[in-house]
C-alpha cells in the first residue's frame, strides 16, 4: 500500500505514541484501526494435533475469500536468475515436491495447492514426510492453507529449501519440525500483497483486511525463530532475503544441507523462465488498470492460442506475423 501522505485535520491533538514523536494522529489511521477491529478473519482451518512447542499455531484464513494475493515481479525475477530449475538429486516415496508457483497456476495448469498437498499426505500415510521446496511464492492465502495442512500431519515434517522459499513459500516452510537449507538458497519474507483498486475508502478496507494476516504471519515467524515480533515486522516491511547461513542464524532454518543434494534441470529452468515472462506481462497489464482475466485474455490473444498452457503447440502454417506459439511471444517480449 502507498504511504499515507495526507495531512492531519486542523486542530487535531496528538495522542499515544504519536504524541511522543511530535506528530498528530492521522484521521485515516483511526478509521483503519476501527476497520481492522471490525474485519478480523473469522475462520481457522484445521485443528491443532501437534505439540505447540514444536510447531507454531494455525494461521487464520478469510471466512469469505474475495481476494487473491500475489508475489511481486522483482521476487519472481530473482527466482528466475538464481533458483529456477533447482531440484533434488534423489526423491523417495515419502517426499512432496513443491517447485514453482503457490496456488493454481493459470499458465501451466499446475501449481502448489492445499488440495494436492492433502492428497499427497494421505498417500504417504502414517510416517514422516519430507518436502522439497523451490518457489518464489504466489497466492499467500493458499500458502497459509498449505501451512495449516502440513502442521496437522501427526508425524515429523522436514522441509528442504532447494533454491528459494519466498513469500507464500516461506510461510509453508514454517510448518516444518526441521528446516534444512543449502548455502546458496534463500528464504524471503514480506507483507501480503494483493491487487486492489477504488477510492480511499476501498483502500482503507483493503488495508484493514490484510493487517490481521500480516500480524498472524509475523507471530508465526517469531514463534519459529524466537526473534522479537517487532523485529520480524521490520523484516517483513523491508522484504528481507536471507541466505542459508543467515536463515540458520536467525532461526528460520535449523541446519545446512550439503550442495550435492541438489541439481539444476536446464529444461525445467528454461520452461520456468518462459512462463514467468508471461506472469511479468500479466502483472504489468494489471498494474495498468486491467482486470486479471482481461490481462490473461489479452496475452492469449497475442499468443494466438485458445488455451493458456505452456505446451500448446504452434499452429501449422502460421505466417511470419502470426504469434501462434509461445516461442514467438517470448521473442517479442524479450526484444
Image: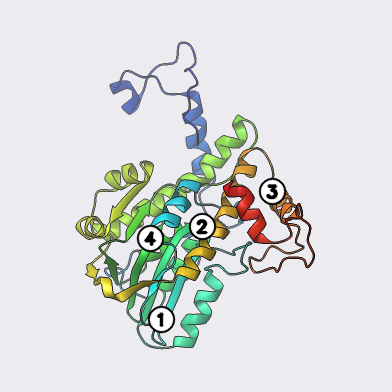
Q: Residue 307 in the image: state x and y as whole percent.
A: 73, 64
CA separation in Å, label 3 and label 2: 17 Å
**Crowd band around label 1 with a 10 angstrom C-alpha radius: few (<14), some (14–19), many (20+):** some
Q: Residue at x 29, y 43 (%)?
A: 230
Residue beneath disc 3: 295
Query: How is the structure coloured here?
Result: rainbow
Q: Name the mark nearer the viewer: 4 or 2.
A: 4
- The mark lying in front, picked from 1 and 3, is 3
Which residue is under mark 4? Answer: 164
Among numbered discs 1 and 2, the one appearing first in the sequence = 1
- Element marked by disc 3: helix
- Picture quarter containing residue 244? bottom left
- Disc 1 + disc 2, Cβ < 8 Å: no
Question: How far apart in space, not on screen, are marks 1 and 2 (Cα)?
Answer: 21 Å
Q: Secondary structure at mark 4?
A: strand
Element class at badge 1: strand
Q: What residue is shown with label 1?
A: 95
Q: Which residue is mark 2?
A: 138
- The tag earlier along the polypeptide, 3 or 2, is 2
> Residue placed at 41% from the left, 23% from the top?
25
> Which residue does the image show at 66% across and 60% down from the upper left?
326
Dot 2 lies on which element? strand
Amino acid at each position: 500500500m502507498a504511504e499515507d501522505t495526507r495531512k492531519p485535520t486542523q486542530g487535531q491533538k496528538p495522542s499515544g505514541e504519536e504524541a511522543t514523536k511530535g506528530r498528530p494522529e492521522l484521521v485515516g489511521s483511526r478509521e483503519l484501526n476501527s476497520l481492522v477491529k471490525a474485519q478480523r478473519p473469522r475462520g481457522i482451518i484445521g485443528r491443532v494435533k501437534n505439540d505447540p512447542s514444536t510447531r507454531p499455531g494455525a494461521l487464520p484464513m478469510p471466512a469469505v475469500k474475495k481476494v487473491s494475493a500475489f508475489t511481486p515481479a522483482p521476487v519472481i525475477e530473482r527466482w528466475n536468475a538464481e533458483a529456477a530449475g533447482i531440484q533434488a538429486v534423489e526423491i523417495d516415496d515419502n517426499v512432496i515436491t513443491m517447485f514453482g508457483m503457490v496456488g493454481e497456476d493459470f499458465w501451466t495448469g499446475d501449481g502448489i495447492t492445499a488440495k494436492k498437498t492433502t492428497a499427497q499426505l494421505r498417500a504417504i500415510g502414517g510416517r514422516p514426510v519430507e518436502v522439497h521446496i523451490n518457489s518464489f511464492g504466489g497466492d499467500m492465502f493458499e500458502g497459509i492453507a498449505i501451512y495449516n495442512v502440513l502442521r496437522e500431519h501427526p508425524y515429523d515434517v522436514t522441509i528442504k529449501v532447494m533454491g528459494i522459499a519466498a513469500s507464500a513459500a516461506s510461510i509453508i516452510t514454517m510448518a516444518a519440525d526441521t528446516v534444512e537449507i543449502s548455502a546458496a538458497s534463500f528464504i524471503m519474507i514480506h507483507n501480503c500483497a494483493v491487487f486492489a483498486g477504488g477510492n480511499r475508502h476501498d483502500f482503507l478496507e483493503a488495508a484493514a483486511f490484510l493487517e490481521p494476516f500480516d500480524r498472524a504471519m509475523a507471530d508465526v515467524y517469531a514463534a519459529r525463530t524466537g526473534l522479537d515480533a517487532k523485529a520480524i515486522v521490520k523484516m517483513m516491511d523491508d522484504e528481507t532475503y536471507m541466505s542459508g547461513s543467515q536463515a540458520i542464524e536467525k532461526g528460520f532454518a535449523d541446519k545446512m544441507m550439503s550442495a550435492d543434494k541438489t541439481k539444476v534441470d536446464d529444461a525445467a529452468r528454461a520452461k520456468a523462465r518462459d512462463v514467468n515472462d508471461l506472469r511479468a506481462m500479466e502483472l504489468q497489464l494489471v498494474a495498468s488498470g486491467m482486470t486479471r482475466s482481461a490481462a490473461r485474455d489479452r496475452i492469449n490473444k497475442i499468443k494466438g492460442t485458445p488455451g493458456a498452457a505452456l505446451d500448446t503447440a504452434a499452429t501449422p502454417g502460421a505466417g511470419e506475423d502470426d504469434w501462434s506459439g509461445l516461442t514467438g511471444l517470448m521473442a517479442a517480449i524479450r526484444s
